[in-house]
Image (cartoon, rainbow, N blue to C red):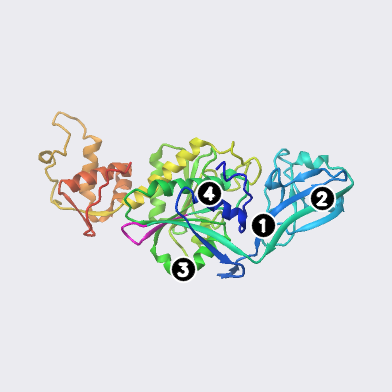
Amino acid sequence: MRRLYPICRSITGDGVRRSLAIIGEYIPLEIFEVPTGTPVFDWTVPKEWNVRDAYVKNSEGKRVIDFKKHNLHLVNYSVPIRQTMSLAELRPHLHSLPDHPEWIPYRATYYEETWGFCLSQRQLETLEEGRYEVCVDSSLQHGSLTYAESYLPGKLEDEILLYTHVCHPSVCNDNLSGMALLTFLARALRDESRRYSYRFVFAPTTIGSITWLSRNESRLARIKHGLVVALVGDPGPLNYKKSRRGNAAVDRAASHVLLHSGLPSQVLEFTPYGYDERQFCSAGIDLPMGRLTRTPNACYAQYHSSADDLDFVRPTSMAESFDVCRTLLSVLDRDGYYVNLKPKCEPQLGRRGLYRKTSADRDVGQHDLALLWVLNLCDGRNSLLDIAEKSGFAFGAVAAAATELLDAGLLRDAAGEKAQDFASVE
């Protein structure tokens, strides 16, 4: 995150390429370039924007607003301009946050060709009447939109899709946190056995996901579960936003993992506002795709401002978010349907070394109770996640019980697949 922080990113341009090159040092990436003018559903890939310098100088030649000191000083996607003007002419192009006078706001003008500068309210109040030299040394021309994928093949061609946006400049929680988390998640999963294949997508918000969906529409049926990851480093509670379907396996698994995580969290119903889940859950796409954040977008004061910096993002928050993501993926990857091979009354667990309760014990232990739940509900119609939800046990306890029963020859895979080892599920 420290390496990515100084880079001026946008929905197109070299800032995205530089950022993806850094991520590519950690995980294998395939880079895609989609030319300007490419139709993507109802949208069109925009012109590519790059910036070299931008400033406002006062009559003494001093830079009173300087892009090189903080890239939020320039309204993202500002068109080129070099002009001298009065303060009155300049003011309509200046943006500040009066309620937070020390902060610089983050603003963008992707689809309207104009220009502007952002500065703190304190800085704005020091500007004196006079003539100002305004320079935006940028280019807006035919080029391409850049995104990247990291693909981890599994035993199945069916996929779990993970998406994060890469287009914001020097703001950390939104969304260097998501970029960093998915990078390290892909690296952690690289050497693990996987049932599903995993596709990690790093792309701009909105136009990036629309472009990706347009280019991959024929393959969407492979996506069985999905997650948009963003804003995962702030100190707020974890928030999972359900998919449009509301009861997809990823929705149930995320709710279950958060419930048993012991961390402050909440589960939100789907709304057509937010980040790229809006596109993945649009009416004509409707993928089983949820979103994991900590504090949702626009719900914390530092959102889209210079206060969303490296000090605002907490290592403990990142670690918690990483662990929840990894556990969620583990549940999705390990869930399955099994059949009890001794369904008429309970099998004799004691002679198989599975039952730990003695006749003197008043209550059955949690281990033994988990075995009984799995035996009772493994009828080919209840998945392990179903059993975890009905029993109140964490998925890991149910999965561990299933492993013991599989090893003892008391369960078989309802799909006829080779039995999976669930012991690694936490």
Name the one closer to the observer, 173 or 271: 173
Residue 237 position within the rendered picture, expressed as x and y whole percent measured from the top left:
50, 40
Q: CA distance from mark 3 to mark 2?
A: 45 Å
**Secondary structure found at label 1:** strand
Q: Are marks 1 and 2 in contact (CB under 8 Å)?
A: no
Of label 3 and label 4, which has the lower sequence position? 4
Residue 319 part of the magenta segment: no
Of label 2 and label 4, which has the lower sequence position? 4
Left or right: residue 46 compared with residue 147: right
Q: Which residue is mark 1?
A: 50
Q: Residues within 10 Å of mark 4 (few under 14, many from 20)?
A: few
Q: CA distance from mark 3 to mark 4?
A: 29 Å
Q: Quadrant of residue 299?
A: top right
Q: Which residue is mark 3?
A: 217
Q: Residues within 10 Å of mark 3 (few under 14, many from 20)?
A: few
Q: Which residue is mark 4?
A: 22
Of label 1 and label 2, which has the lower sequence position? 1
Q: Are marks 1 and 3 in contact (CB under 8 Å)?
A: no
Residues shaded magenta: 153-162
Identify which amino acid the numbered label 4 is placed on. Ile
Q: Which residue is mark 2?
A: 91
The residue under the point 23% across, 54% down is 338
| Whether residue 339 is situated above or below residue 367 in the rendered picture | below
Residue 157 part of the magenta segment: yes
Identify which amino acid the numbered label 2 is placed on. Arg
